[in-house]
Amino acid sequence: MKIVKAGLEGLKASDLVGKSAHVEGEMTGNPNFATPTPSLVDVAAARAALVAAITAAQSGAHAAIATKNEAAKTLATMLVKLARYVNSVAGGDVDKAVSSGFDLAKVPDPIDKLEAPSKLEGSTGS
């Protein structure tokens, strides 16, 4: 089954803002996802809070950086929940899933057949 992934691993806070804006843009008015959970309004509010926190953290103050990190964590959690919602609504339909703005997750390739070991030698220990 094809599913989407949040794709947030290794993203900086500013990249997280861009990812969120892209997903919000793709899902706004999208008939495939009429009632997203969490709501796009909540995701937009979390993104706005992160943008404000990034600006405040440029001063280098430890408290502002901690606030930025917490805002980034909140937005990332919301995007993961939104990706799960997309997967549940899309039900494996690739076109629906991709219309959300999230990327498709790679499907693992199964190992077809393992070859039998050759030149196997055994010995007894002392």
Image (tube, helix red, strand yellow):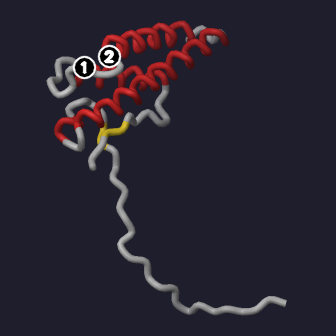
Q: Nearer the viewer, residue 70 or 32?
A: 32
Q: Name the residue type under label 1.
A: Thr
Q: Position of residue 104 (x, y in %)?
A: 30, 42
Q: Residues within 10 Å of mark 2 (few under 14, many from 20)?
A: some
Q: Nearer the viewer, residue 6 or 12?
A: 6
Residue with the most extreme left position? 31
**Residue at label 1?**
35
Residue with the most extreme right position? 126
**Residue at label 2?**
39
Residue drawn at 17 percent across, 28 percent down = 32
Q: Could you tell whether 116 is left or right of 39 in the image?
A: right
- The correct choice, above or below, for 7 with respect to 20 in the image is below
Q: Residues within 10 Å of mark 1 (few under 14, many from 20)?
A: few
Q: Name the residue type under label 2.
A: Ser
The quadrant in which residue 125 appears is bottom right
Residue drawn at 47 percent across, 85 percent down = 116
Quadrant of the frame with the C terminus: bottom right
Judged from the image, the secondary structure of the residue bearing numbered disc 2 is loop
Q: Position of residue 91 (x, y in %)?
A: 24, 40
Cβ atoms at labels 1 and 2 below 8 Å apart: yes
Q: Nearer the viewer, residue 20 or 122?
A: 122
Residue drawn at 41 percent across, 30 percent down = 80
Q: Position of residue 113 (x, y in %)?
A: 38, 76
Report the number of discs: 2
Residue drawn at 20 percent across, 42 percent down = 94
